[in-house]
Image: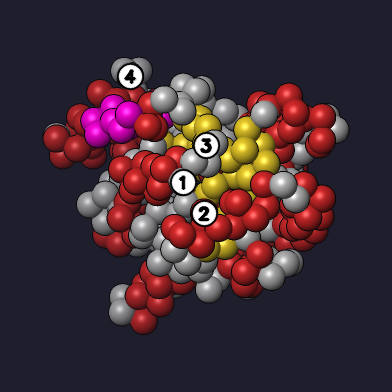
Amino acid sequence: MKVAIIGSKDFDSLEYHLHDSLEFLGHQVFHIDIKDVIKIPYRYNYWATKLFPSYDELIFKKIAEKVIEQEPDLVIATYRFIHPVCIRMIKQNLKAKVIHINPDQMTTLEHQQIFASDYDAWFTKEKYMLDFMQNKMRLNAHYFPEALNPRVHKPSAKDRNQLEKEIDIDVVTFGTMYPYRSRMVSELIKADINVVLFGIADKRFARKEIAENFRNEFITGERKAEVLCGSKIVFNNFHYAEVNSANVKFFEIGGIGAFQLCDYKPVLEEYSKIDVEKFTYRHIDEAIEKVRYYLDKPEERYALSDLQRQHFIENHTYDVRLTEMLKLIHK
């Protein structure tokens, strides 16, 4: 089958992994990024599409034309800001099914373009959103949790004990340091926990204690596996709008084989091989208590993370998700 993907080509993005997984499963993939039709820096193009509706429509008409030329059997859209004219053009000119996969929580829906477009099916990771989409808007919506890519999210080849000595980090966190995340990490630091941060610092509302612990390094691929497996604990605090869903880090950390502490959500019980009480917290004091408990118990951490990794590799990869999705839409 020939599949067209409309979305980012950046390494480690959802679309990157969809592309990789579809090819691994034997499908032909045509992948188009907004940067393929407009050669100006992404940040300028992004704001231009926001400020000038006619420009926005022009860009997505060009993308539609490129997709139509390829005559795919299935079109997967992931951008949340795709102009409805793009989807309309594709459906008018092709017999292909056109679906949308939204990998994020409910605060990132832009101008709600995905609800203004007539997709054949919508896929969301958030059960609250799924209920709203199915029962309030009568959309053909389906559940699609985030996942990991076993060809990218895999353990470091180094010995775990030796790696911990080399990395020498008690608690690590990574990603964009939004204010809510900074507040929570600050509480760990105030509790005299050694926290190291990787990713993008919050320059607008910088906090001194955060800046002092920041490495200013964006980690991906083998380096991410090395840092996460070499850190005793990965602190994974979900976005506050993850009502009943898990972020992609939850699955990536699990696939890499690192030990994580994350927010408790009921949905985690359907994802996890081990008792969720062992690696989740309901409030920051519980997070601090569990960090202190696990720091000097490497064998317990290794045993739990190894069990979780095997379960995730069998049940929560993009290969598994896409196989199930393709069966569903071609019933």
Task: Estimate how packed mark 2 is, as few (under 14), some (14 to 19) or many (20 or more) residues with alpha carbons within 10 Å.
Answer: some
- Residue 189, percent from left and from top: 45, 40
Three-letter code for the amino acid on which mark 1 is drawn: Ala
Residue identifier under label 3? 195
Three-letter code for the amino acid on which mark 3 is drawn: Val
Residue 138 part of the magenta segment: no
Labelled pair 3, 4 in contact (Cβ < 8 Å): no
Residue mark closest to the camera, 1 vs 2: 1
Find residue 288 and name its label.
Answer: 2
Three-letter code for the amino acid on which mark 2 is drawn: Ile
Find residue 105 and name its label.
Answer: none
Residue drawn at the location 14% of the way across and 34% of the way down: 52
Residue mark closest to the camera, 4 vs 1: 1
Q: Nearer the viewer, residue 251 or 295?
A: 295
User: Residue farthest to the bottom?
Assistant: 135
Determine the secondary structure under disc 4: loop
Left or right, residue 235 beside residue 140: right
C-alpha gap between disc 2 and disc 3: 12 Å
C-alpha gap between disc 3 and disc 4: 34 Å
Labelled pair 4, 1 in contact (Cβ < 8 Å): no
Labelled pair 1, 2 in contact (Cβ < 8 Å): yes
C-alpha gap between disc 2 and disc 4: 42 Å
